[in-house]
Amino acid sequence: MKKLNKIWLFLVVALLSITKFADAKTELTSSTEVKWTTFDKVLEEAKAGNKKFILVDLYTDWCGWCKKMDENVFNEASISTELNADFAAVKFNAETAEPVVFKGKTYTFTKDGQRGANQLALELGKVGNKLGYPTIVILDVEGKKLQAFPGYKDVQTMSVILNYFKSESYKKMDFQQFQSGQ
């Protein structure tokens, strides 16, 4: 009987330990996730949260590099913490068929060849008259486009982009100058 009680005690302690570990892991994960919002809420949330900028992640469902950025960059604690502190963040599927309202204007999907894109994605993300995925777009808190960065960005490059705007260096020099001085 004593042996059975010891086994039960061991099982209860083990179960409690596992539960505590899972709770701690969940708490850590949720505190380091990017707090994504939508275009219809972002301007209000940016102002209410005293954010300095808006970061837009333009992606598509089929884009492998977009998924890699989600996995390797936006899940990185240093990036998500920095984003949540100083930026309102929007994750926007550029191929969404649903109309999107931003700054009082409605943007719709436009078919182009086999695919197409939402007009807002085209307006914000085009660089050199081309739209690629992923594209990171930085807006001011009024929703004015400051700069778009097409292509996959690793953690180090994303950190430099965030610092470029946080330090207000974008007002004094272009990104290549800033990046070369890092």
Image (cartoon, helix red, strand yellow):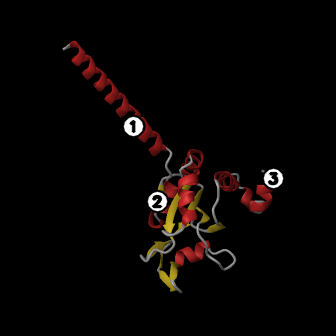
Report the disc number at residue 132: none
Q: Quick one: SS at disc 2?
A: strand
Q: Is 4 located above or below residue 168 in the figure?
A: above
1 or 2: tag closer to the N-terminus? 1
Q: Residue at x 57, y 53 (%)?
A: 72
Q: Give the farthest residue toward the top.
A: 2
Q: Please state which of residues 181 and 12 is positioned toward the viewer in this rendering.
A: 12
According to the picture, the residue beneath numbered tag 3 turns out to be 181
| Closer to viewer: mark 3 or mark 1 | 1
Q: Residue at x 35, y 33 (%)?
A: 19
Q: What type is the residue that disc 2 sits on?
A: Thr
Q: Quadrant of the N terminus?
A: top left
3 or 1: tag closer to the N-terminus? 1
CB-based contact (under 8 Å), mark 1 and mark 2: no
Q: Position of residue 101 (x, y in %)?
A: 46, 73
CA neighbours of label 3 inside 10 A, class few (<14), some (14 to 19), many (20+):
few
CA neighbours of label 1 inside 10 A, class few (<14), some (14 to 19), many (20+):
few
Report the disc number at residue 37: 2
Q: Position of residue 20 (x, y in %)?
A: 37, 32
Q: Quick one: SS at disc 1?
A: helix
According to the picture, the residue beneath numbered tag 1 turns out to be 22
Q: Position of residue 77 (x, y in %)?
A: 56, 45
Q: What type is the residue that disc 1 sits on?
A: Ala
In the image, taking residue 61 as reference, residue 4 lies left or right, namely: left
In the image, taking residue 96 as reference, residue 162 lies left or right, namely: right
Q: Is 101 located above or below residue 160 in the figure?
A: below
Q: Residue at x 37, y 28 (%)?
A: 17
